[in-house]
């Protein structure tokens, strides 16, 4: 495993853990089902993306997988800490009435019968004792999920489904944000990000001129977005990416000087012309056209 991935994952674990602990102290009115988990996942992923820049994390697929796992783990940690606090509160507030010990002993003596009729009778007896406050409160995790889901009229099963949905939502958002920096162009020669130095969107006849410069043929292009980027390698010309949109069907063609599947073969003179056209379009200098 490259050192960049290992360091980034360690930073992600720290970010997810700290964020999970901090949000566990959120007041109850802010513990909105689904919404807080989504915000948590997005913020966790954004912080992981920021950490990826100085750590030279440039592996998008790993960023997506790590972000998904850590986003879900952070949300699960927060919910788990809420559950522990809720359980402690229930236990501290519980005052067993007279006869509670005897009722608990009767239930323990009954065990787990196999006959459906006896099972039903014991369950009814347990529910009656629970309503009378003769049994200790249920402090299990499924019971807490049921308690949370009761605010939107859902039972235990609904609470478990909502919890799974929260984890999935947090995982998706965290993965998406964590991928942001890792997906940006990176130069393995100088070990730095390839940063944009010029960018502009052309339309109409100007889009056709950019398409001709890119060697993309004479098709009817309605829009062309040209970007020039540069790393810190000495003597290297800028890299170019051109997005061409066909008129009518909104099909986008990507031409890049750094990709083999859609090569953009531009000479240094052509790149200079492209830079001049971008500057002219932005009013930075005049051209003869």
Image (cartoon, rainbow, N blue to C red):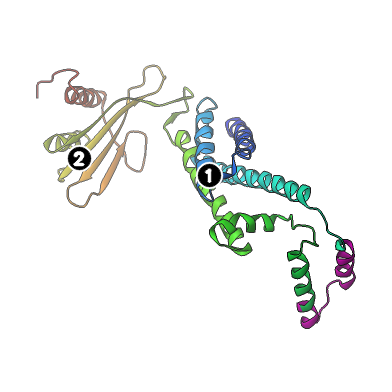
* Mark 1, secondary structure of its residue: helix
* Mark 2, secondary structure of its residue: strand
Q: Residue at x 54, y 29 (%)?
A: 51
Q: Residues under labels 2 and 1: Cα distance?
A: 39 Å
How crowded pointer 2 is (Cα within 10 Å; few <14, some 14-19, many 20+) is rated as many
Q: Residue at x 85, y 69 (%)?
A: 107
How crowded pointer 1 is (Cα within 10 Å; few <14, some 14-19, many 20+) is rated as some
Q: Which residue is mark 1?
A: 36
Residue 194 colored in magenta in the image: no
Decide if residue 239 is on the left or right side of residue 172. Answer: left
Q: Residue at x 63, y 62 (%)?
A: 156
Quarter of the image that includes the N terminus? top right
Instruction: Give the x, y percent position of residue 235.
Output: 36, 17
Mark 2 vs mark 1, foreground winner is: 1
Decide if residue 276 is on the left or right side of residue 152. Answer: left
Q: Nearer the viewer, residue 288 or 100?
A: 100
Q: Nearer the viewer, residue 10 or 86?
A: 86
First reached walking from the N terminus: tag 2 or tag 1: 1
Quarter of the image that includes the C terminus? top left
Quadrant in which residue 283 is drawn: top left
Instruction: Give the x, y percent position of residue 103.
Output: 86, 66
Q: Nearer the viewer, residue 114 or 46?
A: 114
Q: Which portion, as a residue range, is magenta?
A: 101-120
Q: Which residue is mark 2?
A: 223
């Amino acid at each position: 495993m490259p050192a960049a991935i290992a360091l980034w994952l360690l930073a992600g674990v720290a970010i997810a853990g700290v964020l999970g602990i901090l949000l566990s102290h959120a007041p109850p009115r802010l513990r909105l089902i689904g919404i807080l988990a989504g915000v948590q996942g997005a913020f966790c992923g954004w912080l992981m993306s920021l950490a990826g820049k100085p750590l030279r994390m440039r592996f998008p697929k790993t960023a997506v997988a790590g972000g998904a796992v850590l986003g879900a783990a952070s949300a699960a940690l927060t919910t788990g800490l809420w559950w522990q606090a809720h359980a402690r509160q229930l236990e501290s507030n519980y005052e067993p009435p007279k006869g509670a010990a005897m009722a608990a002993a009767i239930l323990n003596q009954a065990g787990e019968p196999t006959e459906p009729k006896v099972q039903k009778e014991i369950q009814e007896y347990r529910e009656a004792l629970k309503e009378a406050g003769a049994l200790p409160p249920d402090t299990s995790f499924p019971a807490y999920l049921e308690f949370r889901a009761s605010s939107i009229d859902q039972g235990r099963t609904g609470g478990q489904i909502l919890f799974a949905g929260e984890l999935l939502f947090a995982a998706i958002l965290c993965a998406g944000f964590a991928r942001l920096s890792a997906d940006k162009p990176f130069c393995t020669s100088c070990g730095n990000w390839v940063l944009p130095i010029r960018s502009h969107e052309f339309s109409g006849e100007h889009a056709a001129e950019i398409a001709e410069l890119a060697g993309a043929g004479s098709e009817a292009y309605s829009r062309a977005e040209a970007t020039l980027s540069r790393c810190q390698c000495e003597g290297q010309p800028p890299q170019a990416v051109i997005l061409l949109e066909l008129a009518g069907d909104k099909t986008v063609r990507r031409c890049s000087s750094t990709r083999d599947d859609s090569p953009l073969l531009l000479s240094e003179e052509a790149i200079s012309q492209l830079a001049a056209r971008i500057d002219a379009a932005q009013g930075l200098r005049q051209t003869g056209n």
